[in-house]
Amino acid sequence: MSAIIDVSGVSKSFGGVKANTDISLTVEKGGITGLIGPNGSGKTTLFNSIVGYHPIDGGSIKFEGQEISKMLVPEIARLGLLRTFQQTRIYGEMNCVENMLISLPHRKLSLRDAFKQNTAEDSEKAIHLLDFVGLFEKRFLQAGSLSFGQQKLLEFAMALMNEPTVLLLDEPTAGINPTLINGLIDRLRRANTEFGITLFIIEHNMRVIMNMADTIYCLAHGQMLASGKPEDIQDDQRVIDAYLGAH
Amino acid sequence: MSRNHLFYAVLLAATIAAPFLFPSYTAFLATLWLFIIVALTWDMTGGQMGYNSLGNIFFYGTGMYAGAVIAIGLYFPVGEWTDASRTEVLTVTGGQYYMGMLLGIPGAGLFCGLCAYLIGPLFFGLRGPYFAIGTLGLAIAAGEIVSNIEWLGGGQGISMPHSPLHPDFEKVLIYFLYAGLGVVLFVFLKWLYSTRFGAAINAIRDDEEKAEAMGIHTLRYKTLTWAISAVFVGMAGAISAFQLIHFEPLETAYQTINLGIFMVVCVLLGGKGTLWGPVVGAILFHVFKEVTWNYFLGGQWVALGLLIVVIVVFFQDGLMGYLKHIRPDWFGIRVDEKEADA
Ligand SMILES: Nc1ncnc2c1ncn2[C@@H]1O[C@H](COP(=O)(O)OP(=O)(O)O)[C@@H](O)[C@H]1O
Ligand SMILES: [Mg+2]
């Protein structure tokens, strides 16, 4: 396997707060990579840096070998590097199917395609993916009226609709009904194996990420604390201390 | 023929018959169409895309001048035409007048569309109130700048070539130019809002950050939307130029507090972000305006101010928004009852 995302020496601070200090990591193509760390350790900040949400103070970020640290959010998204939001962002006034149709991969649409109506295949794909995440029954309901967990599932389905190469998921299981978490883990895995999407997942829930990821990185206080296979991370005293210390 | 088709056919027939059935209202109806055009185009950015422009009147004024420059410039040097000390009488023939219209109106539209396309990237870096004020600044500045360009007649304004038609017929011609443009615009928007482009600009309105994160060409769509609306406003401006015969920059062309505000009020009254809202709003507003301007002369601005306050305070979503609220099913909106109650 080869690195599809290559972060090296990235730092980012907000005023006096050093949210990320000299972070280096790689995300392997085709795999599932985890990013863990206590609250406030800088995980979301790192995601934001990767997708171009804010300029970084130093370092380099490469996607498929191309330097992207100076690119804009939509440009990076159109390369096939997509993210979901920790706070979940969907278009609340529209129904689920409309949310899905807006998420068609615009990098694959020419301007002429944009002036066409959605096709029957687009709608089929939308409904199929809504079914995939378990929202088939809710497909014509206004998205803003769904529960937080369902909105998260919708956001995940929208990301799949976009056919990304890499998907960055910020705490996909937060706020999801615990009885549904296993189902979601299964779907994340299938997104990886069946759709071939490389996943990079921020997860607070250790059990979830240990189950899924091939490689895990752990941040603490904005710095890289440890990295390795799940079983190594699980037994790493520094990681255990960081988590215990935070609670 | 479905009921919908029948409805549109009746409307179209009424539009065509109106100036013949009610000849004394031709000018009133022409202005109504102008209001419909500026309201529909304002709603493209304001309602459908979430960018409230206070400067769309810039395209109206620029369309007037562009139309004039083309209609005159085809046959005379514009500077000579506008020269105040000129003594010789310059006139155009009937054929030249119609050729000026034929080229001047679409030409003005294209020129305004190009202007919007070029300045769009500058303004679409601004959000919320900054966009609104920025665009207003554009319209105000343009009026002042044009007042100082002698070539365009300066503060005195500019006179259009004389129409070969009897004023009564000229009125009907102007009515049909506005009505034709309005109908084309309505049909065009009905189609545009059904495309992926329409969905994309709605996405920008609902959550632009999300739209960017999903890779939507936000700047391209925003600029194009504004440019398309500018084409129609510019054409409407050029028609107004022919209608008014003589116009000047500050009170007529770049009339920020009149038409520039009216278009926003029309949309707010009818309901933002809907196809019919701006049309209904334009009708309501135009009637309101005629009544207050005719019967409360002197108090008309007070009445208009009160209307704006009432809309903004009590009726923010306009008539269509209100209907959407009490009858969501008419608009195909369904909410998750279980979650909504929980
Ligand atoms: N936009 C911002 N402005 C100021 N401080 C920020 C901003 N974003 C994050 N931070 C700070 O950076 C640190 C890391 O935050 P974050 O990346 O959200 O952590 P995590 O996702 O690991 O919980 C925190 O101290 C947070 O307060
Ligand atoms: Mg976070």
Image (tube, coloured by chain):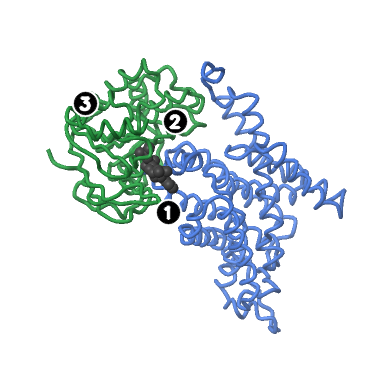
Chain colours: A green, B blue
The subunit letter for the residue under badge 1 reads: A
**Observer-nearest of B185 and A3:** A3
N-terminal label among 1 and 2: 1
The subunit letter for the residue under badge 3 reads: A
The subunit letter for the residue under badge 2 reads: A
Mark 3 neighbour density, 10 Å: few (under 14) some (14–19) many (20 or more): few
Give the spatial CA distance, label 3 vs label 2.
24 Å
Quadrant of the picture in which ligand 2 is shown: top left
Mark 1 and ligand 1: say if the CB distance to the nearest ligand atom is below 8 Å.
Answer: yes
Question: Residue at the location (54% across, 51% down)?
Answer: B229
Residue B53 percent location from the top left of the image:
58, 52
Question: Residue at the location (23% across, 37% down)?
Answer: A217
**Observer-nearest of A63 and A12:** A12
Q: Share a chain, discs 1 and 2?
A: yes
| Residue at which label 3 appears | A194
N-terminal label among 3 and 1: 1
The answer to whether A75 appears left or right of B209 in the picture is left
**Helix, strand or loop under label 3:** loop
Give the quarter of the figure containing the C terminus of chain A.
Answer: top left
Question: What's under tag 3, amino acid-wise?
Answer: Glu
**Helix, strand or loop under label 2:** helix
Question: Residue at the location (60% across, 57% down)?
Answer: B133
Residue A178 to residue B260: above or below: above
Q: Nearer the viewer, mark 3 or mark 1?
A: 1
| Residue at which label 2 appears | A98
| Residue at which label 1 appears | A15
Give the quarter of the figure containing the N terminus of chain A.
Answer: top left
Mark 2 neighbour density, 10 Å: few (under 14) some (14–19) many (20 or more): many
Question: What's under tag 1, amino acid-wise?
Answer: Gly
Mark 1 neighbour density, 10 Å: few (under 14) some (14–19) many (20 or more): few
Question: Residue at the location (55% across, 20% down)?
Answer: B340
